């Protein structure tokens, strides 16, 4: 691995694995490699200050420096915003609710909007297996449903570049901004969110909300239309949470979240 003081330094896969392992232990995750790089770049910007305050003997000892550097990376990763959709992996979140509805109506199309098109085959297979197994007994039904929920959430989170850590129970705490955004989408009233967003951002918040609402009432069997809605839905939520700048600031987001 190159000297971390070099502008050409790049994190090794071992370091990234350790950072993600740290995330699993603390419950704080980095959404994707871009956030890791952002944290690493922050460290590089501060490298001169670090050089000044660090003892020369420590800097000259390769292993000692790498340990200090890795520690700094872990701290920044722990403090980095978790931009994963905070209730996409809960039993009372939108994914599992749609999964329950799909099972009840025996229609897998209801959940396909949440995943990339490339993963449709896996979800359809998991759904078909679930529908076959769950009729065998009450216990089989419980286990089959649980397995389908986990498969759906796992694939959805993989599409976001976020580790799967299981499906959280009903009542798992979520960010107040997410709760307010949920209520806004459900009621068609943006008021609950506006109070939580800076005045300067409210015009764009309103624009994103209106776009999501305009796409909301799609035919559940029109998966393409469903994905267009989810794309607008995600952009609205991210902006409401303060995790995305103005349109075009971070490039386009995928249709899944």
Image: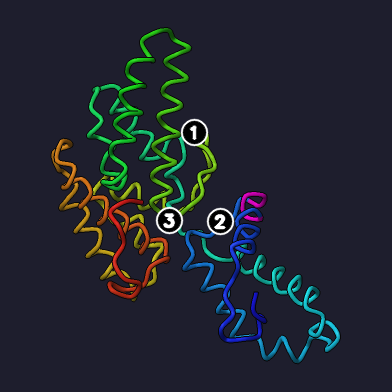
Q: Pointer 3: residues within 10 angstroms few (<14), some, or many (20+)?
A: many
Please name the residue shown 26% across and 52% down the image: 189
Please name the residue shown 27% across and 39% down the image: 112
User: Of 195 and 146, which appears nearest the observer?
Assistant: 146
For this orientation, the residue located farthest to the front is 1
Q: How many marks?
A: 3
The part of the image, by quadrant, that contains residue 3 is bottom right
First in sequence, mark 2 or 3: give its number.
Answer: 2
Give the residue number, with chain letter if any, for mark 3: 177
First in sequence, mark 2 or 1: give its number.
Answer: 2
Query: Real-space Cα distance between discs 2 and 3?
Result: 19 Å
Give the residue number, with chain letter if any, for mark 1: 170
Is disc 1 in contact with disc 3, using a CB cutoff of under 8 Å?
no
Q: Which disc number belongs to residue 110?
A: none
Query: Is 24 in the magenta?
Result: yes
Q: From which residue to which does the magenta span run? A: 22-26
Q: Pointer 2: residues within 10 angstroms few (<14), some, or many (20+)?
A: many
Please name the residue shown 49% across and 48% down the image: 174
Query: Is 196 in the magenta?
Result: no
Q: Is the magenta stretch mostly helix, strand or loop?
A: helix
């Amino acid at each position: 691995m190159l000297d971390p003081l070099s502008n050409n330094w790049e994190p090794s896969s071992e370091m990234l694995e350790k950072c993600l392992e740290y995330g699993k232990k603390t419950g704080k995750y980095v959404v994707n490699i871009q956030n890791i790089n952002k944290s690493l770049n922050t460290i590089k910007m501060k490298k001169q200050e670090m050089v000044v305050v660090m003892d020369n003997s420590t800097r000259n000892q390769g292993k000692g420096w790498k340990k200090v550097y890795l520690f700094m990376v872990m701290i920044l990763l722990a403090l980095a915003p978790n931009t994963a959709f905070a209730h996409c992996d809960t039993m009372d979140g939108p994914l599992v609710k749609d999964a329950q509805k799909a099972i009840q109506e025996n229609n897998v199309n209801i959940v396909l909007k949440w995943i990339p098109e490339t993963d449709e085959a896996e979800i359809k297979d998991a759904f078909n297996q679930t529908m076959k197994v769950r009729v065998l007994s009450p216990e089989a039904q419980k286990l089959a449903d649980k397995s389908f929920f986990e498969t759906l959430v796992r694939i959805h989170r993989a599409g976001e570049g976020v580790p799967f850590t299981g499906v959280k129970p009903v009542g798992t705490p979520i960010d107040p901004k997410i709760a307010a955004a949920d209520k806004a989408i459900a009621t068609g009233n943006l008021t609950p969110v506006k109070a939580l967003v800076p005045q300067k951002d409210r015009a764009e918040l309103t624009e994103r909300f209106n776009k999501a609402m305009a796409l909301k009432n799609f035919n559940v069997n029109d998966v393409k239309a469903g994905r267009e809605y989810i794309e607008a839905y995600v952009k609205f939520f991210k902006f409401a949470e303060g995790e995305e700048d103005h349109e075009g600031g971070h490039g386009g987001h995928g249709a899944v979240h």
